[in-house]
Image: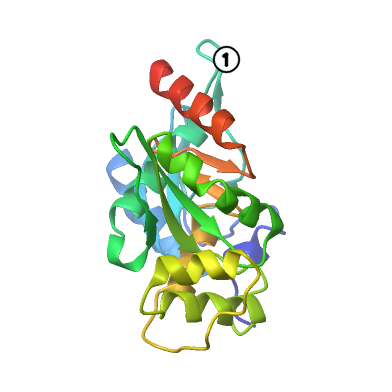
């Protein structure tokens, strides 16, 4: 049976035939080699020493995991600096999300631009049939008037081939995507269309960056915010984060 990261995490450790690293310069290569053997196909990003001595952090499929220097043990969890009260793991995840968002082409998104001065940009993983996604969309005009640009990515929660997935494909393949999205969010059945589209790739990306439900918002600093917020509360949150940065 093919092993995946999720199935292996049901166990307590990654077991690999390696001894203790003789030098820190060898650790990254050792960890990458272990991951390649135990989890073939896993996308490994950066590997670096963590703030906690003796552990190394590795970015796997957009998430952060910690490894012992010999590559034998995997630790799942968060590291929090109690002096600054900063969640160091979430900071690292945020940086990974920003990198993932920067790699996207806006032509593959459905964008509702701010009116007048753009004050904030949010990237929203959305499901056509999600009730709170529709509630957020019903306030699109107000969000845009407040200077918030909304960039949609598809995240049909029921998965590839579901009714919601097929609706998303039809919307992304429409001649006028914004009009098709407006109609679909109002409960209309979009005209069935097919084309080369990014829906499955965006769904997979959502899983990689930690999306578990919709709507999920990726903010300009890489923070992932799950759930719906009314337009005015959204602006207050965004302004607060901007002042705190």
Q: Residues within 10 Å of mark 1 (few under 14, many from 20)?
A: few
Q: Is residue 117 left or right of residue 165?
A: left
Mark 1 element type: loop
Give above or below for 4 relative to 126: below
Residue 168 pos. (x, y %):
53, 74
Tell me: residue 88, above or below residue 162: above
- Nearer to me, 2 or 72: 2
Q: Is residue 214 among what the camera can see? A: no
Residue shown at 40% from the left, 74% from the top: 198
For residue 36, above or below residue 46: below
In which quarter of the view is residue 80 placed?
Answer: top right
| Closer to the camera in the image, 179 or 5 | 179
Q: Above or below — where is 198 with respect to 60?
A: below
Residue in the image at 51% along x and 35% along y: 90
| Residue, disc 1 | 82
Q: Position of residue 239 (x, y in %)?
A: 44, 23
């Amino acid at each position: 049976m093919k092993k995946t990261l999720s199935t292996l995490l049901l166990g307590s450790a990654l077991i690999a035939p390696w001894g203790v690293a003789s030098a820190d310069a060898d650790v990254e290569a050792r960890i990458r080699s272990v991951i390649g053997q135990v989890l073939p196909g896993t996308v490994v990003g950066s590997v670096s020493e963590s703030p906690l001595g003796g552990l190394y952090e590795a970015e796997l499929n957009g998430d952060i995991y910690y490894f012992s220097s010999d590559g034998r043990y995997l630790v799942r969890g968060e590291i929090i600096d109690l002096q600054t009260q900063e969640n160091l793991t979430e900071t690292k995840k945020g940086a990974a999300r920003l990198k993932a968002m920067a790699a996207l082409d806006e032509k593959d998104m459905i964008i509702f631009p701010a009116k007048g001065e753009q004050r904030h940009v949010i990237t929203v993983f959305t499901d056509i049939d999600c009730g709170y996604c529709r509630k957020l969309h019903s306030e699109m005009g107000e969000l845009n008037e407040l200077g918030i640009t909304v960039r949609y990515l598809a995240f049909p929660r029921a998965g590839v081939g579901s009714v919601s997935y097929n609706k998303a494909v039809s919307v992304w393949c429409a001649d006028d995507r914004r009009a098709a999205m407006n109609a679909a969010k109002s409960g209309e059945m979009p005209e069935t269309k097919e084309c080369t589209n990014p829906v499955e790739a965006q769904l997979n990306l959502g899983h990689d960056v930690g999306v578990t439900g919709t709507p999920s918002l990726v903010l300009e600093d890489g923070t992932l915010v799950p759930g719906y917020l009314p337009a005015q509360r959204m602006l207050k949150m965004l302004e607060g984060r901007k002042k705190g940065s």
